[in-house]
Amino acid sequence: MELTYQDYLTILKEIKQQIDFEPEIGVVLGTGLGNFANEIQVEKVIPYSQLSKMPKPTNSNHSGEFIFGYLNGIKVVLMKGRIHYYEGYSTQTCVVPIRLLGMLKIKTLILTNAAGGVNFSFTPGDFMMIEDHISAFVPSPLRGTNIEEFGTRFPDMSNIYDAELTQKIYQRGKELNLPMQKGVYLQFPGPQFESKAEIKAFRGLGADAVGMSTVIEAIASNHMNIKTVGISFISNLACGMSKRKITDEEVIEEAKTSEKNLITILKEAIQISHDK
Ligand code: HPA
C-alpha cells in the first residue's frame, strides 16, 4: 500500500519532534559517499527505523538514516540509505525519503550515485554531471493517485537537472582538475547488471552512463518543484566495454579509491548550490 499524505505528515511530525531544523540542501549519498557525514558538523541522526511507515533499505551498503547538520554553516540533510527498486519496493515507495526531504522544505536536492560508463570516452574515476535522463523499464514514481500537495498530475520534465547549477559545478570541478564529464543517465531496474546488447542498444538511444537509481528520485524531486542536481561517479565501464566482469565489489573498490575526489566535488556542489 502506498502512503497517504496523512502518513507523510505523521512521519514529518516524528522527525520534527526530534529536531526542529530547516535544511536548505538535501543530499542523497550514493555508493562511496557513506563517510560524508564525517565532513559535516552533525546535529542529529535519525534512523529510518525510528520512523513509522518508512521503507527500510535491504542493501547492507546503505544503512538508512537522515543526518542533519552544517557544512561551512550551510544547513544540510544527508540521506544515507537509498531505497532501490530492485529491492522489491514500488517506485512510489522508493521515493518516500525524497518526499520527506521535500516536506522539510529543502531548496536544492543533490543526487549522487555510482554508475557504469556507457560513453566510450569515459574512464572509471570520472564524474558525470547528469544533464538529462532516460528511464528504461522502470515505472514512474508518480503512477497512481496524485498527491496534489506534492505537485501537479502532469509535471514538466524539461529541466530535470538544473542546467545552470549543473554547468557551475562542472566548471568548478574542471578548475580543480577533477575528471569531469557531462551526459545522460539511464536507469535500469536491476539488480542484474546489463547485458552487452542492452548497453549497445541504449548507447544508440543516447545513454552515457547507466545505474539502478536516481531517475525516479529526480522525477519525484521535480514533481515537488525542488531544484535538482545529479552527479554520477563512473565506477566501471558498462557491460561489453572491457574484458572484466562487473561486480559490486569492483564498484565499491573504485569508489573507495576516488573517495577524496567524491568528497571534494560534493562539498563544492553544496557550496555552489548555496551561493547561487
Ligand atoms: N550498471 C548498472 N549499475 C551500476 C553499474 C553498471 O555498470 N555500475 C555501478 N552501478
Image: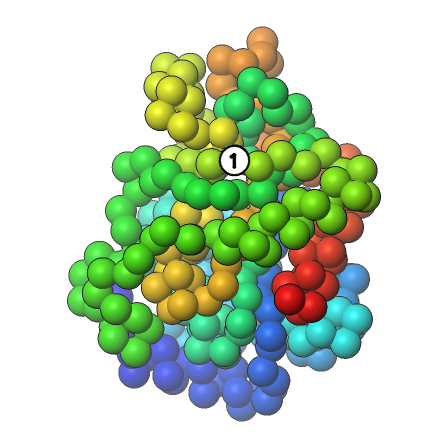
Secondary structure at badge 1 equals strand
- Along the line of sight, the residue nearer the viewer: 44 or 242: 242
Q: Residue at x 54, y 14 (%)?
A: 241
Numbered marks: total: 1
Pick the quarter of the image with the C terminus. Answer: bottom right
Q: Residue at x 65, y 52 (%)?
A: 168
Q: Nearer the viewer, residue 228 or 255?
A: 228
Give the residue type at disc 1. Gly
Q: Is residue 81 left or right of residue 69?
A: left
Q: Residue at x 58, y 12 (%)?
A: 242
Query: Assess mark 1: CB under 8 A from ligand 1?
Result: no
Task: Name the residue beneath numbered marker 1.
Answer: 183
- Tell me if residue 26 can be seen: yes
149 vs 260: above or below: below
* Percent of width and height locating residue 138: 30, 42
Query: Residue drawn 71% across and 74% down?
Result: 74
Give the x, y percent position of residue 216. Answer: 38, 51
Q: Is residue 220 above or below residue 261?
A: below
In this rendering, position of residue 270 left or right of residue 230: right
Residue 216 in sight: no
Q: Nearer the viewer, residue 83 or 27?
A: 27
Q: Could you say which quadrant of the image residue 40 lies in? A: bottom right
Q: Residue furthest top?
A: 243
Q: Is residue 68 left or right of residue 54?
A: right
